[in-house]
Amino acid sequence: MQGDKNALIEIAQYFDSEKELIEYLGYHIIETNENQVAKRIVEENCLFTATEISIDNKTSKSDFINFLNRKLNEITFSKLADAFLITPLEKRPVNIEFRAATENKLKDLQKAKIEILNKEWVKNANIENLIQKKDPKCLLIISSELFKIRYRFNVHHFNENEYIDLLSLLTNLEFGVENEKKEISWHIDKDFYPESSLNLLIYLSANYKDFVWDEQKGKFVNSKIQITKPDKETELFQQLNNENDTIALNAFTELTNCNPEQVIKLANEYNGARIEHNYAVGTFPYRFLKQLVQLVSVYKVNEINYNSNSKVKQYINNLKADMLFKDRRKLEDEIINNLSLNDISSFEYWALINENFWDLTYSAGRILDIFYSNHFDEILNKPVQLELYLKKSSLFDELGIIGICNNYLVKFTNLKDAGISKLNSIETSDNDVKLQIEKAKNICNISLKAPNDTKKINDANDDFKVDNIRQSILNISKIQDQEKMEDSLTEFLSKISYYQIEEAIKGIEHIEFKESNWKKYSFLERDFGFFTYDNFDTVTTRIEFLRDYKKYSEFDLYKNMLSKSGLNYFNIDKTLNYDKIYEALKYNVVVAFVGGGGGKQDNEVYSIIKLLELTNKTTLGYPKKICNSNGIYGCDSQDRANYWMQFLVDNKLLKEEHNEPVSFHYE
């Protein structure tokens, strides 16, 4: 690394060594041998061309020594590259493209100008003086300093963007050079391997003098190069990391309506380079854009009003708002009942655009699940709608995110010959649809199965017996280590029974948790399913809950929660309405449409299960609580719901057929 040729001769001695050794790369322990390490060091610090020598697993000690004997006098150490080489940088071929920087990019660069020019590396390399003199050599030195900080084993820098930003600031250009894949990279600062930064250095080594300072334009210009104008898609992609949420989200939305080929190309480029983005555009915006831009193309062909459907857009905005469970459920049901098949396509589009709103994406999961079950016969009997549904199932499955978006084909479960016949009637040239047809036909032949939960009782869910609540809590509160105290308390609280809740709440009232009290009270919702109480962190909520807890029996407490939420699962004679309950068990343990953190929302399902358990005097083999959560969010009611649905069927308690397709989260 210091340019001592003798080091090349010395390291050649290790090229045949199989002696094992261990290297440490961050947290990784790598078992290797001396010849692999020696060759890696040579590759990292030498820029020999392929015609001069190729260093690989087959390169022996004698191969490298023979090369050195023949070429040692020609080998020089480049101070620009901090590497040994034979062929000078300026004599090497290079492919390069130039693109005018966008207005938004230039505005951002101007804001950061003073900060960049004051960077230590700028001053140490004398770049600041060269800029003041309007000397184009500053461009060469910037590229040199960038290549010098290339990745070498266990040494990595995280400020490569500063070098590229300064080049763009001085030239108003973006440079595109070949990377290790021989593809043009416009994100040199994001490339892990050094080929692109080397090619930039090679170009400027030979051509930096062609750049001349234009006083009027305030930048270096080069009359010998061709500069392309950035297309609309490129400008919009650069806005995805804008600090302003509205600007970023508007750019994202507009991109879904742009040229699909260019959007997909740029999405792959940005995703591969891991370009940062504003969180407002979602968790995986580049993956989503690839699918959304294709979805929009399909909508346009089918003349679906996806973009300006005012009714749908209003529903989406309403679902994004923070609201009580009662109001959200009422709105969800209104949407399910009021949307058409064309409307639902628009709804999916806007729900994907607004994926980062978790309340929305969970509501969308329930809405789409029930809507498609209600309309599946209509879809099956309309070839255009069936083909559209299959196409969406393919596009959504490629979003690369958890959620019911991956499960659209599940609705074909158990349709048998009737479903297969409808699928066979589809005539299409779309390969995605063809593939989905074959998958769906296989699913049609899958019969409904009885639930089979082999772990009804486990470490996270068992009936524990604890005594001396107050004294136990007092003893735990005296633990000096705060973290251990909190963990011990949440573990203890997860084991109490329904009839010990009041004593437990009063016992922990004055115990403070370091960061947030949500963990202290999480057992109330996660273990007992008290879903309607707004926030147990607040004293008013706890007072309200304890008032109800003391006032009602266990059955009536759960019944009262349902009533407060606007839910009625009872007949006129006050007996349980098993048909309504069946539908709730089927659909209301909700999985998000896309993302949402991966958990399930129990909503009112556990309350219904408690009513079933207390009425029928059985827990179907499960413990008395939904979970012993111990402060975690890892339990849900889905398995219990499946068993109770089967119980209602087996005991002939249902009056209706309930032959609609299965839920998206059917397993």
Image: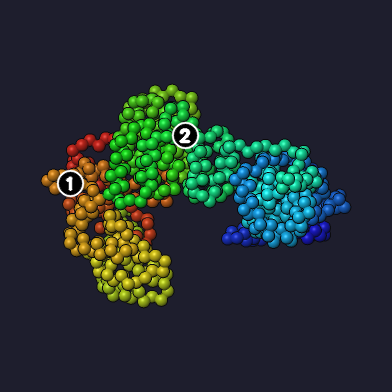
Asked which secondary structure carries label 1, the reply is: loop
**Where is residue 467 shown, x and y percent of the image?**
26, 71
Above or below for 645 versus 119: above
> Which one is in front in this view, the residue at disc 2 or the one at disc 1?
2
> Does residue 39 show up?
no
Q: In the rendered view, does 273 fall on the left or right side of 69?
A: left
Residue 151 x/y as whole percent: 67, 54
Image quadrant occupied by the N terminus: bottom right
- The residue type indicated by label 1 comes to Phe
Q: Is residue 518 visible?
A: yes
- The answer to whether residue 310 is above or below residue 476 is above
Give the Cα distance between marks 2 and 1.
43 Å
**Residue at image point 86% right, 50% down:** 74
Q: Which amino acid does label 2 sit on?
A: Leu
Quarter of the picture holding the C terminus? top left
Q: Nearer the viewer, residue 29 or 324?
A: 324
Q: Where is residue 129 in the image (x, y as percent from the top left)?
A: 76, 57
Q: Residue 570 carries which label?
A: 1
The residue that disc 2 covers is: 295
Q: How crowded is mark 1: few (under 14 residues within 10 Å), some or many (20 or more)?
A: some
Residue at image location 43% in from the left, 27% down from the top: 303
Protein image colouring = rainbow
Residue situated furthest front in the rendering: 216
